Image: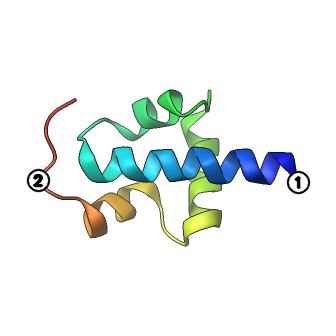
Amino acid sequence: TFTHYAFRMRVSAAKGMLKNTKMRVSSVASAVGFDDATYFSRIFELMTGMTPQNYRKTHAEDAPQE
């Protein structure tokens, strides 16, 4: 569905931000179009199998500050 497609695109963009920046998760959520960081975290976890925080710990490089 379109909604699923939109979530996949938003989560994909968020994954890049989580890997390459030290932005707060709530700021990443807002940047990719989610008004509610908790809802973003739930969707992110459903689609990736891990929370945004765990994703960052696992995949982060030496990220520059926002």
Which badge, 2 or 1, comes first in the chain's sequence?
1
Residue lying at 49% horizontally and 68% vertically, measured from the top left:
50
Other residues around mark 2 within 10 Å, as few (<14) / some (14–19) / many (≥20): few
The three-letter code of the residue at mark 1 reads Thr
Residue 56 horizontal/vertical position (percent): 31, 58
Residue lying at 78% horizontally and 53% vertically, measured from the top left:
4
The residue pinned by badge 1 equals 1
Could you give the CA–CA distance between mark 2 and mark 1, rounded to whole angstroms? 36 Å
The residue pinned by badge 2 equals 62
Residue 22 horizontal/vertical position (percent): 23, 41
Specify the quadrant that holds the N terminus: bottom right
Residue lying at 64% horizontally and 43% vertically, measured from the top left:
39
| 38 sits left or right of 54 in the view | right
Can you tell which quarter of the image residue 52 is in?
A: bottom left
Q: How many marks?
A: 2
Residue lying at 75% horizontally and 51% vertically, measured from the top left:
5
Circles 2 and 1 in contact, beta carbons < 8 Å: no
Other residues around mark 1 within 10 Å, as few (<14) / some (14–19) / many (≥20): few
Specify the quadrant that holds the C terminus: top left
In the rendered view, would you say 22 is above or below 11? above
| 7 sits left or right of 22 in the view | right
Q: Secondary structure at mark 2?
A: loop
Viewer-nearest residue: 15 or 50: 15
Residue 2 horizontal/vertical position (percent): 84, 47
Looking at the image, the residue that sits furthest to the right is: 1
**Mark 2 or mark 1: which is in front?**
1
Q: Secondary structure at mark 1?
A: loop
The three-letter code of the residue at mark 2 reads Asp
